[in-house]
């Protein structure tokens, strides 16, 4: 404790700290000294804008505190036991206000601010059931799905059908909620919608598929659609050069590619056909005549598999289909009868789910008539030339006369464009109009140098336009099966 020059401690400062109320130069700091019995100045009212202001309005009154035994400290309660001693225990804090404070913050969706202003005395409810239901009913919007919708493609709603199966539209009854089938359907739709693009810049940027890619996926789904039983497709036009071999090879190629194989292209020409010569792969030169000689052995073996046929059919590597060629020399050339066709078709149907038959140029031959009797689908192959289109129309009339009008009505007409100049004479318009009045659909295959007559057909080297047309041809054929 320091003293001044006279030894007095009257000018003592804060206890425990040396008094230093003078500085060099003679100036003395005016430090106030507390005096006993001095009147305390009246306390200024609390400033609510001060950072040290403490709101004590929530403290209970003295009367309430005395009656309840609760002190002014937060969350403590004084209780007196039987011995007269007082103990403190924690209790929940309750507001001194008699009523619940009105809620003036967040406004629920669908409510206007005026509602809160007009009913200021209403208390805030903690029941958010209606808001949760309204939020859950909103379908999630995927950015890729929204992009596809902007490009013109409608998207399926991935949200559950919240309408009750008993007719209650609010779906409030838990027993009437969505079933397991609804979950499977919703997950399947959502998985398809969220698939990213697989090609181009859209794949690089993680965007959804374009309209062109969506159309291709739709065609693939149509081609790969499950079928009931084994099917036989007959490609006909008794005029040579009408495009039968081209259509047969391209159709078998796309069916095999998108239906996981088990497809056979069969040259049922009664003379020297060209299907085997135009096929991409030539693993051997055995023909249908050779298979016919080994047919009794294959038919007698109930455990025979596809490996038993690999010596007779020509596997098209990488294209997922096989070719059964017709005889291509004078010594082996022979006409296959109706019963022989039946035996071949019966055994080949054991190993292939789909058979595409390329027919000859004589609609009165037994194998031609037998193929028409076994066919599940007809494909009329023609070009824009007058002779081929007229002959195809005569084949149509002959089938109607044979009582196969049901096949004609469900048939598909494929028009192959053989010139890059297009339809200069307008013959294609008349051909299309004629067949549209009879068949289910007409498909055009544009001109492509890779499909020129006399060349080996390689479906992997055709142009993009040709690829899309061939996909549409295959999808349209499967639509009718």
Image (tube, helix red, strand yellow):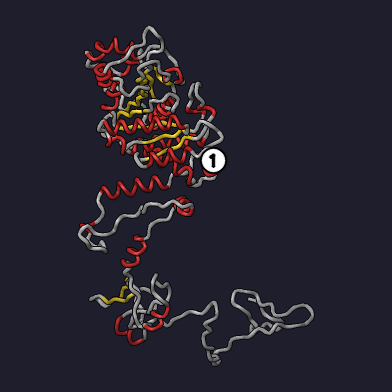
User: The N terminus lies in which quarter of the figure?
Assistant: bottom right
Q: Position of residue 167 (x, y in %)?
A: 22, 61
Quick one: SS at disc 1? helix
Q: Which residue is mark 1?
A: 200
- From this view, report whether residue 8 is shown above or below residue 187: below
Q: Number of numbered discs present?
A: 1
User: The C terminus lies in which quarter of the figure?
Assistant: top left
Of 128 and 20, the residue lying toward us: 128
Of 84 and 377, the residue lying toward us: 377
Q: At 29% from the left edge and 84% from the top edge, which residue is drawn?
A: 67
Q: Position of residue 217 (x, y in %)?
A: 42, 41
Relative to 195, is 170 on the left or the right?
Answer: left
Of 370 and 435, the residue lying toward us: 435
Q: At 70% from the left edge and 84% from the top edge, which residue is drawn?
A: 6
Of 298 and 404, the residue lying toward us: 404
Q: Position of residue 112 (x, y in %)?
A: 41, 76
Disc 1 residue crowd, few under 14, some 14–19, many 20+, Cα 10 Å: few
Q: Position of residue 140 (x, y in %)?
A: 40, 56
């Amino acid at each position: 404790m320091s003293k001044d020059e006279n030894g007095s401690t009257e000018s003592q400062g804060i206890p425990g700290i040396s008094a230093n109320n003078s500085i060099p130069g003679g100036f003395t700091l005016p430090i106030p000294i507390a005096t006993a019995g001095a009147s305390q100045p009246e306390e200024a009212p609390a400033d609510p804008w001060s950072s040290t202001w403490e709101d004590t309005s929530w403290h209970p009154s003295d009367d309430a505190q005395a009656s309840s035994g609760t002190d002014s400290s937060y969350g403590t309660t004084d209780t007196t036991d039987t011995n007269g001693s007082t103990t403190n225990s924690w209790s929940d804090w309750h507001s001194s206000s008699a009523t619940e404070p009105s809620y003036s913050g967040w406004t629920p969706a669908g409510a206007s601010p005026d509602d809160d202003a007009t009913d200021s005395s209403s208390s805030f409810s903690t029941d958010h059931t209606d808001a949760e239901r309204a939020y859950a009913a909103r379908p999630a919007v995927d950015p890729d799905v929204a992009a596809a919708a902007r490009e013109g493609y409608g998207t399926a709603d991935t949200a559950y059908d919240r309408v009750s199966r008993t007719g209650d539209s609010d779906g409030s009854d838990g027993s009437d909620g969505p079933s397991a089938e609804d979950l499977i359907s919703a997950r399947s739709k959502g998985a398809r919608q969220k698939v990213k693009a697989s090609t181009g810049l859209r794949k690089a940027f993680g965007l959804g598929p374009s309209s062109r890619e969506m159309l291709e996926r739709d065609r693939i789904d149509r081609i790969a659609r499950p079928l009931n039983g084994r099917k036989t497709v007959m490609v006909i036009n008794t005029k040579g050069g009408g495009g039968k071999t081209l259509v047969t090879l391209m159709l078998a190629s796309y069916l095999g590619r998108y239906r996981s194989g088990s497809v056979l292209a069969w040259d049922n020409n009664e003379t020297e056909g060209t299907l085997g010569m135009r096929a991409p792969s030539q693993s051997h030169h055995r023909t249908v005549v050779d298979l016919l000689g080994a047919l009794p052995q294959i038919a007698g073996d109930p455990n025979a598999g596809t490996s038993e046929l690999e010596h007779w059919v020509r596997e098209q590597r990488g294209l997922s289909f096989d070719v059964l060629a017709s005889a291509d020399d004078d010594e082996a050339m022979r006409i296959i009868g109706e019963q022989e066709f039946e035996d071949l078709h019966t055994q080949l149907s054991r190993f292939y789910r789909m058979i595409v038959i390329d027919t000859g140029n004589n609609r009165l031959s037994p194998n031609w008539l037998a193929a028409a009797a076994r066919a599940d689908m007809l494909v009329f192959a023609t070009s824009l030339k007058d002779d081929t289109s007229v002959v195809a129309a005569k084949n149509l009339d002959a089938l109607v006369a044979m009582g196969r009008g049901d096949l004609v009505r469900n048939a598909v007409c494929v028009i192959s464009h053989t010139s890059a100049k297009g339809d200069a004479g307008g013959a294609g318009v008349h051909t299309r109009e004629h067949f549209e009045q009879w068949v289910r659909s007409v498909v055009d295959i544009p001109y492509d140098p890779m499909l020129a007559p006399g060349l080996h057909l390689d479906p992997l080297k055709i142009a993009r336009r040709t690829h899309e047309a061939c996909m549409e041809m295959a999808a349209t054929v499967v639509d009718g099966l």
